[in-house]
Amino acid sequence: MGRLAGFRYREVVKRLKKAGMQFDRQARGSHEIWFNPVADRYTTIPNHPR
């Protein structure tokens, strides 16, 4: 499991926005890709219903 395991989707999104990341695009299935323009890095997070 990744470092984001155990967090709810809304909490992860709140932390990503606080870190300066922006929603980039919807990935395959129920995953989202977020981008940090300062660090020029991407991260993928799952958006599962539970």
Image (cartoon, rainbow, N blue to C red):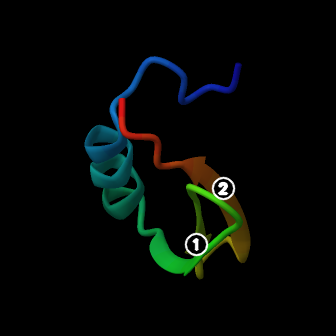
Image side of residue 9 versus residue 25, left or right: left
Query: Observer-nearest residue: 7 or 49?
Result: 49
Compared across the picture, whether 47 is left or right of 10 comes to right
Distance from disc 2 to disc 1, alpha carbons, whole Å, reads 12 Å
Tell me what residue is drawn at x 58 percent, y 72 percent: 36
Res 50 → quadrant = top left
Q: Quadrant of the N terminus?
A: top right
Q: Nearer the viewer, mark 2 or mark 1?
A: 2
Q: Of the residues under marks 2 and 1, which one precedes in the sequence?
A: 1
> Which residue occupies 37% across, 39% down?
49
Say the numbered circle drawn on residue 44: 2
49 is higher (above) or lower (below) than 30: above
Residue 1 shown left or right of residue 16 in the figure: right
- Amino acid type, callout 1: Asn
**Residue 38 drawn above or below residue 11:** below
Residue highlighted by disc 1: 36
The crowding category of the residue bearing disc 2, from other C-alpha atoms within 10 Å (few below 14, some 14 to 19, many at least 20), is: some
